[in-house]
Image (cartoon, helix red, strand yellow):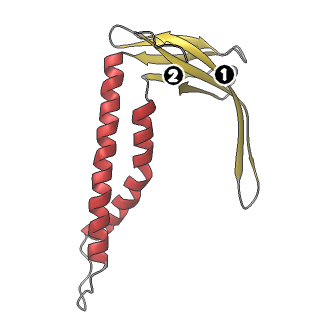
Amino acid sequence: MNRPIPGTVEVAVRHILSDKVTGFLVRTRRMTWKDNVFRVRRPQAGKQTVELTCPVCDASLLAEVRTEARTRRTRIVLRTLAALCVIVFFAALAYTIHEGGKTLPEGQSLPTLFPVSVVSVFVTFAITPALFIHSRVYNGVSLLDAPKPRRVHGLRPVKD
Ligand SMILES: [Zn+2]
């Protein structure tokens, strides 16, 4: 890849060519797309809307670009959330195993915190990887508006 230029960010406009789900019992999703890399300038402050034209279908897409500082802050927030989720996951898991493994005296039910911890285990298990991935690839550019008729487009971060 090219050397990073300060104050700019590279982003790929992804034009989805086809998206097919086949199979009956085992579903396979087959997607084909074409990525086109653009270099967009970051604003000095706040956020800025840029227009990107998809070279495949000429559709114009609106993307919102945030400052370098803001992007870094969002990444830190995401990483902190991910770390917190890991802590909650292990705490809830330990509690669930601890309470679930007890033999309760007749007529006594599990504490109300038990179902809460079970749910916490599943929720944090599901969202933690997404948070981690997001905190690594987040580049401060998000797709605002897709054209009509709505063709499927996406924005992908490009690693410098
Ligand atoms: Zn397109």
Q: Quadrant of residue 121?
A: bottom left
* Residue drawn at x 23%, y 74% as measured from the top left: 111
Please name the residue shown 76% across and 59% down the image. Answer: 24
Residue 14 placement, left or right of 40: right
Q: Farthest residue toward the bottom?
A: 106
Please say if 11 is above or below 108: above
Q: Check disc 1 and report its element: helix, strand or loop.
A: loop
| Residue 84 on image: x %, y % | 28, 47
What residue would you read off at disc 2?
144
Counting from the top left corner in percent of width and height, residue 15 is at 67, 25
- Comparing marks 1 and 2, which lies closer to the viewer? 2
Q: Is mark 2 within 8 Å of ligand 1?
A: no
Judge by depth and name the residue closer to the eye, 77 or 114.
Answer: 77
Q: Is residue 131 above or below residue 53?
A: below
Mark 1 sits near ligand 1, with its Cβ under 8 Å away: no
**Vertical relation: 68 (above or below) 124:** above
* Location of residue 56 with respect to 26 vertically, above or below: above
Q: Rounded to the nearest whole Å, what is the CA distance between mark 1 and mark 2?
A: 13 Å
Left/right placement of residue 123 relative to residue 22 reads left
Q: The residue under label 2 is which amino acid type?
A: Leu
Q: Secondary structure at mark 2?
A: strand
Q: Position of residue 91 (x, y in %)?
A: 26, 60
Q: Where's the N terminus, which quadrant?
A: top right
Residue type, mark 1 in image: Lys
Report which quarter residue 62 is drawn in: top right
Residue labelled with disc 1: 148
- Residue nearer the viewer, 123 or 147: 123
